Image: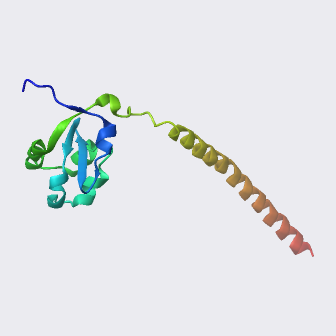
Amino acid sequence: MGSEAKLVSLHEVSKHDNKNDCWLIISGKVYDVTPFLDDHPGGDEVLLLATKKDATEDFEDVGHSQNARNMLADYYVGDIDINSMPQKGKQPPGSQQAAASSGGSYSILMFVLPLLMLVLAYGLYYYANHASVE
């Protein structure tokens, strides 16, 4: 194999995300699994849900046989351009802001809820003591 493998970007792979054209990224390689969709033992929906991302973990979690691993060679398109993949541990822009704002709401709730319960308990105590006096 003297020729260099074709590099494919995540953007390009993401265009192939339907039943008529389905590409997956598994272990740094890109595969066009469209011809296999109807034959996949887990159904085509499982494969379609694994598009637009690195599907390596999904593939490994199932525990595919060596035969299934060997079949991947028939569908090989090229290698994924790792520079086009999001870095692990980093969130896309905007998602950090959403995570921070939801975390802030949770913190406020953790403060307000006990305070509200305390006020309610005091109100019940006050009402019970004044109601028995009359």
Q: Is residue 23 visible?
A: yes
Where residue 120 appears, x then y in whole percent? 76, 61
Image point (42%, 34%), residue name:
89
In the image, 123: left or right of 3? right
Q: Quadrant of residue 107?
A: top right
Residue that sits furthest to the top in the current view: 2
Q: How many marks?
A: 0
Give how far across and how far down residue 117 sits, in percent.
Answer: 72, 58
Residue at the right extreme, as displayed: 134
Left or right of residue 118, residue 7 in this image: left
| Residue drawn at the location 14% of the way across and 59% of the way down | 39
Q: Quadrant of the N terminus?
A: top left
In the foreground, 102 or 109:
102
Where 37 falls versus 60 (above or below)?
below
Where's the C terminus, which quadrant?
A: bottom right
Q: Nearer the viewer, residue 111 or 10?
A: 10
Tell me what residue is drawn at x 53 percent, y 39 percent.
94
Between 109 and 65, which is closer to the camera in this rendering? 65
Residue 57 picture quarter = top left
Q: Position of residue 60 (x, y in %)?
A: 22, 45
Using residue 41 as the reference point, say whether residue 131 is left or right of it.
right
Q: Position of residue 14 (x, y in %)?
A: 32, 44
